[in-house]
Amino acid sequence: MARIIETATDAIEPTAVDPVTLDLIENGLRNARYEMDEVLFRTALSPGIREQHDEFPLIADPGGKMVVGQFGLSIPDFLDGYDGPIEEGDVMLTSDPYACGAAISHANDWLVVVPIFHEGRVVGWSSMFGHMSDVGGKTPSSMPTDARTIYEEGVVIPPFKLYAKGVLNDDALRIILNQVRVPDWNRADLNGLVAACRTASRRVVEMCQRFGTATYLSALDALLQRNYDAMKILLAMVFEDGRTLSFTDYICDDGVGNGPYELKLSLTRTGEKVHLDFTGSSPQAVGPINYYINENLTRMFFGIYMITVADPQILWNDGFYPLVDVTIPDGSYWKPRHPAALSGRNHGIGRVFDLFGGLLGQTNPALLNAAGFSSSPHFMYSGHYTTGDRAGEWFQLYSIGFGGIPGRPLGDGPDGHSLWPSFVNIPCEYLESYYPLRIERWETIADTGGAGLHRGGNGVDVAYVFEEPGAIAIHDDRWLTYPWGVNGGHPGSRGTKWVERADGTRQVLPSKCHDVPVSVGDVLHFVTWGGGGWGDPLERDPALVELEVRRGLVSVEGARRYGVVVSEGGSGGDGGGSHGGGVDVAATTSLRERMRADRPAELPVFDMGPPIEELLARCEEETGLPAPKRPVWTT
Amino acid sequence: MSYRLGVDVGGTFTDVLLVDETSGSTWRAKTASTPDDQAVGVLHGITRVCDDAGISLSEVEQVLHGTTVATNAILEGKGATVGLVTTKGFRQVLQIARSYVPGGLAGWIIWPKPEPLAALENTVEVDERIASDGTVLRELDEADVRAALGRLSGIEALAISLINSFADPAHERRIAEIAAEVLPGIPVSLSSDVLPEMREYERTVTTVANGYVQPQVKRYVGTLTDRLREGGVGGELAILRSDGGLSGAAAATESPVTMLLSGPAGGVTGAVWIAEQCGYRDLITFDMGGTSTDVALVQDLSPRIGRETKVGDLTVRASSVDVRTVGAGGGSIAHVPQLTKALRVGPQSAGADPGPAAYGKGGAEPTVTDANVVLGYLPTDLAGGEISLDADAARTAVATVADAMGLASPEAAAAGIIDIVNENMLGGLRLVSVQQGFDPRDFALIAFGGAGPLHANALGKLTGAWPVIVPPSPGVLCALGDATTSRRDESARTVLRRFADLTSDDLRAVLTELGADAGARLEAQGVERSGHTVAYTVDVRFHGQGFEIPIPVDPGWLEGADPAEGPEAPDALTRLAASFDAEHERLFNFLLTVDHELVNARATVSGPRPEVAGVTLAETTGPPEPLRTITIHVSGAAVEAKLYDRATLRAGDVLTGPAIVTEMDSTTLILPDHAATVHPSGSLLMNPVDTPLDTPLDTPAEA
């Protein structure tokens, strides 16, 4: 347990904060949080942060409660994992999920925590973690898809002082950076994380100076209280007392042949409190897909869904946590036992979006979206240049794929976009300038978005042509289970990956693999999945369906899923092979009538596609990959 | 005698400023804008101002114009139907964009995705491929090009943006030639001309935006040129670019995407001129209008230039004055969400119609203007005021906020609204100052726009930027900016090279070539070469970083080491690296040990700055006489404030707060413990009373 050394001895008395000052401090905190992002984006070197913005900042109160941020972190848990004094000028670093109560969830995430001192006392904490593109271990990018323990996943840094009273612990940093493949990246990214936290600290101190420490700290309490009060009203409004809601979604496999993993979440409101319960979820995975989740993080995910629609301008914080109880069974997918492998947890984090959407949407139509691009699939390519000026030089690419945003109450899901905030793709021209590869095709694929009144976004096909021999690795999911549709909307298409070898052969790749050798001229097709559809596709405007056929986003054949008959031919841009030539109104009317007659009068709320047993039985035939083995609890 | 005309077309009014270049005398005219054909309103204004000055139109030598035609085309979605040609495999470059969804976690639930400026049904692919180093991997299939272009029907502009065309424009140029045959009369924008820089989405969207606004800009500039000629104006027309320079009419219609922020750039250049008259060279501009507020930072009389231009949802890569916009203005609506009981101001705005409740046009929601009325800062019965204000309606509207928050009085609610909106604007001021590593206390704050002078003193207090300068007639500052800036042209190119692979000679070769290129274009616009000033900027980063920092290159560096500095004198590349390091350190407080990398190089060539003399007010003859005394509310208390008519003020007059200064198009609030001194050039300089002026009043403006 950490000991915090403060030189100030007098107590700070809580003081009344007028409502306007409260809003001023709320605004100042929000600005500081965005400034943290800005500092890191501009200085990072590794592709994961620099181009894709895989990082999360926060500012906490003296007790460690997040007052602004978007991806909570349990500072109390973090401090529990550290023995020793904490003083002004200290900067803490860790990458060990097991030593900080899952404040971070895999060893690629480096977490920096800085105590903010003002006039001899802690007035808060600033903290930020970012995904390092490589932390050593047995595969480039440090996410071996067959890892069974965290020891295989690179350097694991216990909580320690990177800076003690402002002085850098150079030796420790040297030892850490000696474990990784591209130390320049880690050093720059770490510098950026520290600079961002220090920026936030400066802003907090400025606010203490401007408003007075007592007012500042009392305002934090009031901001936390504001979230608490708002959530209390919302919970009573949205959930029926005593009723239990449940929803189950899946992770298709764990990289070593087991799956699908059931992710079950239930919710019950009793009085003013809500209980979130992961009981019924699968046991911890053998492979590295476990998502070690913190109770507070669960509360945060839940809260964000609840409040985004109610007051989008609210300063998001931890204040409502006492209203939410969380149960996470030990040894489950969500709370694996040390030293279970964790590196491939990005699917689990992403699937949480679908899980909460499916759970909360049952009683809150504004939140009932279809299943979306609930992951951040990775593609890695590395090796040594064999020719040219750079012969012998190491190259290592890490990039994230994007897919279909689901159909939403608001409208269609965008094609080939990110469900994660602030993620961006790496431009083709950037990749071609810095890596020995070429991109032959970068397009969304017609019909991969689920049909619906609001269409699911299409998945994307990126075709990489390799120009140097090397090895590739892939982390993806939703190759077996479907991104579900809602309110009569259809599921989206599943993802798939294959290599067209230079010799003409075609090799289907598992959605999780690494160290797959590639040669010059081989082409990898990295095809992501579509978003589910929202609402009855037979209600979609036929003119819009026809326009999307001309746009190449829906095919003539695919239009029939909406009961729309589009004539072949016609002019316009280069559609995906077939161009629309206008709606055949009579044929559309009769097709829609026939489709209505052939389906149940009441459309299902969720359309998950075929049952799991059927998916497993047809797996090899449909996907070209062997069916995984269903996981079992073995206490 | 020679005359220049500055013309600024706003949403409601067209401002025209006639400047006698010899005497510095100015004449102003404000006429109603004519949105259907802006040229009509412009000509009205010009005719009026020339009548006032007693000169004929033919005596006008130059018409300098900031226009929002391009901006409005984008904001209103009324641009041309653009056809787009891409490399095979990249047809959806605008549809996929950067895959970015704005907002936080779950932000995707409430994000309405804007439609691409070039529709997918109007996008065709061609078979060709160039590598990132310029090697042709696949020759252009011309038959395929003809077939593809043939499929484009009903388009009004064509954009061509091929992968890696920044490295070799040959294929784009050939397609343009074929397009001239297949699609005669359709204007063509090439990405290798518009933005020869790496990153296909940014280059494509910028090129498409150019095509999207081009037909309207061309039509407008054409009409205006004709009308001016018909009206007898002898001089030529120049348009203000987003970067604050002027462009000849013909050049402007070729690259209208460089003109998207023509309006705000006029304000900033006008502010620079005003500040210079007062003896200040470092300033932050603060332009607060009805729905939004623009802020920018100016260092040594040069506005910071950014590489992005944002208009509504659209972001393009085009140099522009680095103006940050905050969605808060006089019309911003205050509201109290039931769930959180927090006081929010904006981003919703009452706009011009119905406008604030005080306008009496049916608006009932409380706005920032209503709060100003309730506090007495905006007197309701001004002599010469264009709009009479309904104080009761404002009070009723603001009372709804007091009720929702449980505050004692409408005045308390109004004070809250003003504090919150000032805080929102402070966020914008911080973006251009603190967050770029600048301390606002080292800058003067110059306030204009309809609402700027009302909030300026408060923002001076929040930022510590003193003095706060309120120019005379803050409403026509844009037109003044148009009339006082110089001709400019720019050439840029991506040169992706680590410093280890680069020499000072390489740098010199690239920059001088770009400078010659831009200089030739400026000369073609009639600006004599002897009057050219060249400025070089290169974008540099540490190898592997994702963002570049623009670094100015002193032309002296390129002339080789100065023998006076001895044999060890650093070469251009070394100086550049040192300059980058200093800037990186200033922005982020650390350096890396990896190699530097050059990314983009740019040369900007400017013509001579016109000499426009300023006005000089008569000397003070004693304390100024207020119109009367009124009651205003400050810090929760009612206090007596003096009300002055700005037209009666003399150089050297000192107005001690609380006071309010009114003029035709603006109202200035001076808070208690602050005083405004009237500068001979007509500006008000506000300072806290306990802080002496840091520039004596009689210091003449530096040349």
Image (spheres, coloured by chain):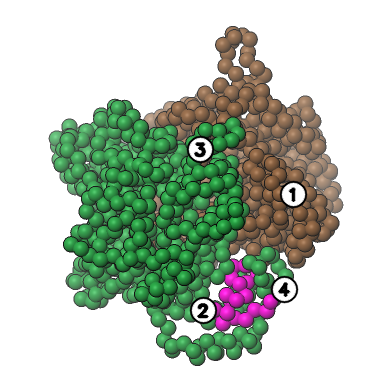
Chain colours: A green, B brown
Q: Do labels 4 and 1 share a chain?
A: no
Taking depth in this image into account, of A603 and B369 the one nearest to the observer is A603
Q: In what element is the residue under mark 4?
A: loop
Q: Do labels 3 and 1 share a chain?
A: no
Q: Are marks 4 and 2 on the same chain?
A: yes
**Which amino acid lies under the numbered mark 1 shown in the image of this protein?**
Glu
**Which amino acid lies under the numbered mark 2 shown in the image of this protein?**
Pro
Which residue is under mark 4?
A570
> What residue lies at 47% left-to-right and 58% top-to-bottom?
A509
| Mark found first going from the N terminus, 4 or 2 | 2
Between the residue at mark 1 and the residue at mark 2, the CA separation in whole angstroms equals 44 Å
Which residue is under mark 1?
B139
Q: How crowded is mark 1: few (under 14 residues within 10 Å), some or many (20 or more)?
A: few
Between the residue at mark 2 and the residue at mark 3, the CA separation in whole angstroms equals 50 Å
Q: Can residue B436 be seen in this view?
A: yes
In the shown orientation, is residue B22 left or right of residue A142? right
Queried whether the magenta region covers residue A575, the answer comes back as no
Which residue is under mark 2?
A537
Between the residue at mark 4 and the residue at mark 3, the CA separation in whole angstroms equals 49 Å
Chain letter of the residue beneath label 2 in the structure image: A
Q: Do labels 4 and 3 share a chain?
A: yes
Task: Please state which of the two labelled residues, at mark 4 or mark 3, is closer to the viewer.
Answer: 3
Task: Please state which of the two labelled residues, at mark 3 or mark 1, is closer to the viewer.
Answer: 3
Q: What stretch is highlighted in magenta?
A: A549-568
Chain letter of the residue beneath label 1 in the structure image: B
